[in-house]
Amino acid sequence: MSDFVVVLGIALLASFLTYLGAPLAEMVEVRHEVVSAALQFAAGIITAMVAFSLMPPAVSAGPQVGAVIAFFVGGVLFVSVEYVLTHLMSFRPGSEDGLASLGLYVGIVVDLVIDGVVIGIGSTLTLRTGLLLALGLAVSTAPLTFVTTATAKRQGVAKEKRRLLAGLCFAAVLAGAMLGYLVLRSQSLDLRLILVALASGFLITTVAQGMIPEANREGEPGFAGILYIGGLSLYALMSLVLG
């Protein structure tokens, strides 16, 4: 079996697990507390992935100064995208809640594409690394798809459009993974690790600037810390088992 077929299977698995959050949100009546819990848990997973799987090889096997600069640039990129989006949407009519939700939608879809690219890049290193990242990211992205669908449902978005949004989440992970693998597998190891560091900066800033503030928008629940550290611990355990 060729590496391409294996990576395609890994990408499809990650995309399918990501998509599962959407039908779950359709089946249950979702309160803000549940959305908050899902975001906190996903934030913990992403933080652990950056800390345990992405940045260590980027700074140990790649150009160290370049990796640190790329990490910073990734964070700046997220802040810039969020600023531009907010600035553009401020000229359109609508409530602040709608504006925040649109930013959440766009942020999640962009995050899913980057997650997919990370899976693809990881697969160019070793297939085991790609599988670990796919499983870890799927555990974090399923709650994000859940949140996206639940938010749209709460705002009265038509069911057909919610299905389209869920399909977009599936496609974002799959497209990102195949793009990352096909485009970058022939590139130098240093370049791939620089891009891993850049994605790490984007993801960790997404957690700090997007996911956790959105989770706590109506007040931080008392169990938020437990869910966040639970996500961290789960990914750490997965990395020990599969690493």
Image (cartoon, rainbow, N blue to C red):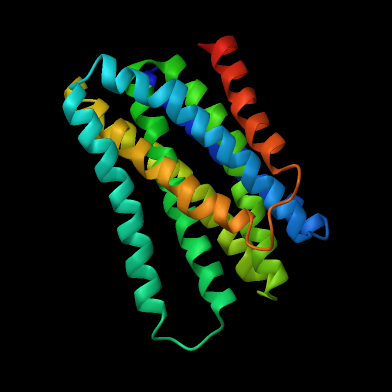
- Check the image and report above or below for 59 versus 16: above
Residue placed most toward the observer, 25 or 96: 96
- Check the image and report above or below for 191 versus 85: above
Residue placed most toward the observer, 85 or 158: 85
Q: Quadrant of residue 229?
A: top right
The residue at 25%/14% (across/down) is 61
Percent position of residue 106, x then y: 46, 61
Residue 36 is left or right of residue 95, and the answer is right
Evaluate whether residue 16 shows in this view: no
The residue at 46%/21% (across/down) is 52
Residue placed most toward the observer, 151 or 220: 220
Q: Which residue of the protein is positioned furthest toward the right in this rendering?
A: 28
Evaluate whether residue 83 shows in this view: yes
- Check the image and report above or below for 190 versus 110: above
Numbered-mark total: 0
Q: If the image is split into quadrants, where does the N terminus sit?
A: top left
The residue at 54%/48% (across/down) is 170
Percent position of residue 58, x then y: 29, 23
Q: Quadrant of residue 31?
A: bottom right
Percent position of residue 139, x then y: 61, 34
Percent position of residue 110, x then y: 42, 53
Residue 98 is left or right of residue 151, and the answer is left
Q: Which residue of the protein is positioned furthest toward the bottom in this rendering?
A: 93
